[in-house]
Image (cartoon, grey):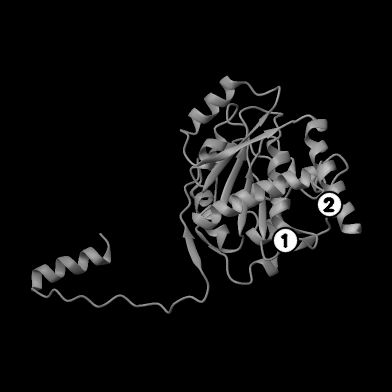
Amino acid sequence: MSRVHDALRRAEQTGVTDLPPEPISAPSAVATATIEFDHPPGYVSSERDLIISGNFLSRIKEVPFTPSVDSHLIDISKPHEAPSEEFRTLRTRLNHLQSVQPINTLVVTSPSPAEGKSFAAVNLALAEAQLANNPTLLVDCDFRRPIVHNLFQTERAPGLTDYLLGKAPLEDCIKKVGNVGLYILPAGEAVINPLELLNLREVKVLMEQLPKAFKWVVLDSPPLLFAADANLLSTFCSGTVLVVRIGTTTIDSVTRAMQSLCENNVLGIIVNGARRGELYSKYTYYHSYYYARAEE
């Protein structure tokens, strides 16, 4: 029996009910959250604290911004190109939502593979990071087919799985990309049980802590109809954005994907794969007119 129970029993026997007060610890200077581990069988870990303090971002190492040739990232040096305009429009709508309701963490997913979820997640994060004082974190939660590290030509590990397994501190897993406000948290080393790892309580606590350092946290997750990862992550985050592809995604798959999310926290749908001629013609006309007027 614990010492508290022993003291209560002695108090009942002697008629003394006053117990010595518990010591009061001094307030901490940084925000601290204690994580209770709930690992599945086979994991060995110990209790630790996750600390995100005011200088957390300064402890993160910077890597050069060298996207791969086939990454299809928006070109921050050409803001008037059509893809950049589209993602800036999406950014504006999300920032408006954030101004009226507490939205910081966002899951980007799709019903099926090859519909452009990673393309949308990466470019949305990059568009957000272009704003001043808007640090944005892109997290690769697709442990089965991670791609973020390839798009930015950086190392896959240490990453999120390494942090969750207690193999590396969080600041060693995150990388700052170039001189923009973009940070990436790659997937980390391969694991054989991705869903069990995402079920750890540390994931929920991490999603609650990250907004202390980042204005936006964008999660690239597996497709909804092929893994339960995105459904689980959506319960930890502020909202979900569904990516569909014209000519590929069926109405049935969209319906089933929405049902799997219980239609909760779905902020909207990104339609990917518009024909180049339709998309680019309006911007070509607009910007040609704009620059002509500017030269007059």
Q: Which of 285 and 174 is in front in this view?
A: 285
Residue 126 shown left or right of residue 251 in the figure: right
Q: Would residue 104 be visible to someone looking at this image? A: no
* 244 in relation to 63, above or below: above
Q: Of callouts 1 and 2, which one flags the residue occurring earlier in the amino acid sequence?
A: 1
> What amino acid type should be assigned to the residue bearing mark 2?
Tyr
Pinpoint residue 58: horizontal percent, then vertical percent: 69, 69
Q: Which residue is drawn at 74% across and 40% down?
A: 147
- The answer to whether the residues at label 1 and label 2 have Cβ atoms under 8 Å apart is no
Q: Which mark is residue 141?
A: none
Q: Which of 17 and 103 is in front in this view?
A: 103
Q: Residue 290 carries which label?
A: 2
Q: In which quarter of the image is the N terminus?
A: bottom left
Please give the residue where the numbered disc 1 appears in the rendered image. Answer: 181
Residue 179 shown left or right of residue 92 in the figure: right
Residue 60 shown left or right of residue 281 in the figure: left
Q: In which quarter of the image is the C terminus?
A: bottom right
Pinpoint residue 260: horizontal percent, then vertical percent: 50, 30
> What amino acid type should be assigned to the residue bearing mark 1?
Gly
Q: Which residue lies furthest to the right in this view?
A: 295
Q: Which residue is drawn at 60% across and 50% down?
A: 94
Q: Residue at x 48, y 43 (%)?
A: 235
Q: Which of marks 1 and 2 is in front?
A: 2
Regarding mark 2 in the picture, which secondary structure is present there? Answer: helix
Q: Distance between the residues labelled 1 and 2?
A: 29 Å
Quadrant in the rendering for residue 144:
top right
Mark 2 Cα shell of 10 Å, populated few (<14), some (14-19), many (≥20)? few
Q: Residue at x 62, y 60 (%)?
A: 214
Regarding mark 1 in the picture, which secondary structure is present there? Answer: loop
